[in-house]
Each structure stands twice: as structure tokens, then as C-alpha cells.
Image (tube, rainbow, N blue to C red):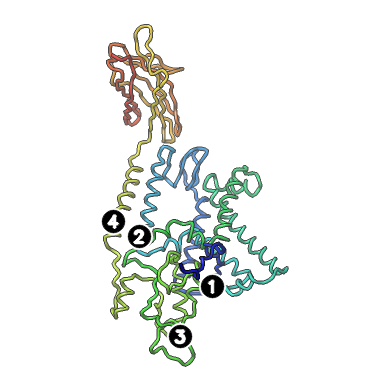
Amino acid sequence: MNQDVKAPKTGGGSMYAETITIHPRHVKKGLFRNLKWWLMVLTLGFFHIAPFLRWDRGPGAPDQAILADITGRRGYFFFIEIWPQEVYYLTGLLLFAAITLFFMSALAGRVWCGFLCWQTVYTDLFVQIERWVVGDRSARMNFDKAPWTATKLAKKAVIQAGWLAVSAACGIGFTLYFGDAFQMMKEIFTLQASLSVYAFIAIIGGFCYLLAGFAREQVCLYMCPYSRFQSAMFDEHSLIISYEEWRGEPRAPARKGQGFEGRGHCIDCKMCVQVCPTGIDIREGLQMACIGCGLCVDACNTMMDRVGLPRGLISYDSITNVTARAGGETGDKTRLIRLRTILYTALLVVIGSGIALSLGTRRTTEVNILHERTPLYVQMSDGTIRNGYTYKILNMVREDRVYNLKLSGINGATMEVVGGAKDVAEMDLSVPGDEITTLRLYVNAPEENVTDKKTDITFVLTEKSQGTELRSTTLFAGPER
């Protein structure tokens, strides 16, 4: 036995990489940087202005265009009004949003993550606040390493105050969608709002403060599930961030008076790494952490302009085009219309058409019937079989309506409403607009006409002004024959 073999070392060290603070460099100009600024203005502008938009729905109805009315248990989106039992519209909308995300990814990679995601938008804004107070990348890195002084403490306080102000605006803006925006704003700033409102603002604003201020790229890397399955959305024609290795390698620094014969165009300035909000090196290939923001493209194009080389060493293009250029071919070979995009488009059309058709043809009256379970039936002294029901009528328009209710399915059956009509085959009911009327009623049927333990009985509700009919079938319980 060999006695010189040493036992492996045990213990010590961490199995996890240490988190490194990323200070992205500012890209002063470029297509993608400008696009990000414009989209930030548009998204945040809409987010904060939308609660104040008005929409006239008639007297007694809220006039806020976009509103989730928790107290009234209603959702409003301009001319659309959604009741609690219509939550399936929300399901359809979420499905539509998911397919839209897949469609965007198939066309342009992680364009959502790079330009429209709230995490990206608010992180950009928070970093800009740091830049205004401290300076660009190198200044912020030195600032973090510098010892604590009164100046550093003051600048930190200004940064934190800016972050808290933006976070508070985020929390307030989100909260305004759940009540009348003008009234809530007044109550919030005069300290007259309820404790639950301030708690809601603190929760939403707190998450904004933590995620955009401290977690940042960690959200994209570890918390967001989309980065995990993004590759399934791409194909060779999807537009993604690509480094053209065939042109850039071998890389070397640019020296004055030195040409680029026999070497690559990449001058190894690492600007693409410094501007990346997640700190990756795109020259190592497409990575899970790449959010497709295109800032590395802008930075690289700026450096190519400085050294007099063609742009596009890093490009927002398809693998097909990159491969074609590597082979000396020219022209755009990207196909936007292909099986994947056709399938996503078809799904969007089907889901969108289904939602629109359902909204356009939905009934303005809903009925819910609940059969009394204890007891299932009662046999009266004269032999009549009685069943109890809770009958709810939902009038979904903002005007009073008169309905006619009658029975079908059992001959001789009559109705009796608690506190109302007794032993009638049909009755008229007045239902206030935009309300639910609940009836506690009994149905009495002759014993000889109840031929089974369970017999179907139909409540026929007719809206008298328009003649629309709503039939609801339920069971009528009786003794076993």
C-alpha cells in the first residue's frame, strides 16, 4: 500500500461566488441608450398619469378610466367593466401577455428585459441618481472604497433620499389604481388616508427600493424565471446580442500608428463589459445574464468610430446573419415570418378574438342558484314536496330592470318567496341597477308529479323590456320511489 498518498483537504472555503457590486459605465449616446431613455419616459409617464384619466360611466359610477375597485368588487378599464365572477378575463389577459412575451422573444430576444421590464426601468433610474450625485463608473467605484467622511455621508444621504423618493412615487402610483386617484392623493399627503393605504405604499415602495437599489442584476440572475428558459424562445433568426468573433479575434489593444493587418478589430478596451448592467463579457458568447439592452452595441460602435473601423463588431442581429457575414456573404437573411412567429401570432389572434367576442356578447344578467342541502326536501301535510333555494339575480347594467320568473319541468309547481309572493307559478321581480338581488324561495310540487329522487327543474328568467331569456336548470329532490 502506498503510504505517500495524502488525504484530500476538507472544509474551508465557500461553495458560492462572492457578490460583486456592479457599477455600469454611462453610455452617452447611441441608438439603444436613446431608446431606453424614451421608453423609460413613456412607461413611467403612463404608469403615473393613467390613474388620473377619466371615463364617464353615468351617475353613481366611478369615473376613473383604469380602476380596481376593491370595495365595490369591480374592475374598470375605460368602457370595460369586470365583475368578480368574470375573473376568467384576467386569466385570458395573462395568457395573452405570456404569448406576447414569447412572440417578442422569438423576434427580438430579451427585448422586454432590456427595455420594458420594471426592474430594468427603475434600476436605470436609480443608477442615474447615483451618477448625478457621485459621477460615472470610476468615480462611484472609488467612492465605495473611500473611507467614511462627512462628504461621503452627505452624498450617501442624498442618494438614499433620491431612491426613497422614487420608491415612494412608485408605491403611491400603484396604490392610486385602487381608488379615486384625486381623492387618494389628497388623503395621502394630508395624512388622512387609512393605515392600510400607507402599508400598501410601504410594501410596493419597499420592494422597489430593495430590488432597484440593492438587488439589481441579482433579480435578473436569480429571482426572475424568464432567464432560465429564454433559450427555448430563440432560434437562429431571433435578434440577439452577438459578438462577431470572426472579425474581432485575435484581440489586442490599439496603439498609435499601428494598423489592424493580421489581427482582429477588437481593441480589448472592455467598454462592452463596463457598460453592461449585469457585468458580463458578451465576447464570451450569449449568456443567461444578458438582458438584451444593447448598451454594449452602442459602446462598441463608439470605440469603432474612434479607431476608424466599421461598426457592428457587437451587433443586435440574428445568428443567421452573423454566420453569413463570417462566411463572406452580405445581405439580411433574417426571416421574421417563420413557423414559430406564425404560431405565436395565431395564438394571439385566437386569444384576443376570444376575449373580444366574449366581451362583445356577454350577458348583462347573471343568475346563481343554490339548492338547500339540509334538508334536501320537506313533505308537507297535504303531500306536497317542498325544496328550498337561494336565487341570486345580478343586474350588470346601471338602470333598474323588471324580470319575470317562472318555473318549467314539473307540472303544477309553484313558488313562494320569503317575505313576498306565495304559491305562484310566475312572478315579476324588480332588480336595482348594478346590484345583486338575493331571493330566499321555496318550490312546492304535487307529490304525484315528483316521479324520481332527483328531478330537473328549470327557472326561466325573462328581462321584460328586451325579452332576453335566461334558463337555469337545477335539481328538485323528492322521496325515493
Q: Secondary structure at mark 4?
A: helix
Crowd tier of the residue under label 3, counting other residues whose Cα lies within 10 Å: few below 14, some 14–19, many 20 or above: some
**Residue at image mark 4:** 343
Q: Residue at x 45, y 34 (%)?
A: 434
Which badge, 3 or 2, comes first in the chain's sequence? Answer: 2
Which badge, 4 or 1, comes first in the chain's sequence? Answer: 1
Which badge, 3 or 4, comes first in the chain's sequence? Answer: 3
Which badge, 1 or 3, comes first in the chain's sequence? Answer: 1
Quarter of the image where one finds residue 236 = bottom left
Q: In this rendering, is residue 450 above or below 381?
A: below
Q: Position of residue 184 (x, y in %)?
A: 58, 46
Q: Quadrant of the C terminus?
A: top left
**Residue at image mark 3:** 307
Q: In this rendering, is residue 440 above or below 433?
A: above
Q: Position of residue 124 (x, y in %)?
A: 53, 64
Residues under labels 3 and 2: Cα distance? 38 Å
Residues under labels 4 and 1: Cα distance? 40 Å
Residues under labels 3 and 4: Cα distance? 45 Å
**Residue at image mark 1:** 25
Which badge, 2 or 4, comes first in the chain's sequence? Answer: 2
Q: Quick one: 5 or 135, which is closer to the camera?
A: 5
Quarter of the image where one finds residue 440 = top left
Residue type (three-letter) at the residue carrying disc 3: Val
**Residue at image mark 2:** 232
Residues under labels 1 and 3: Cα distance? 20 Å
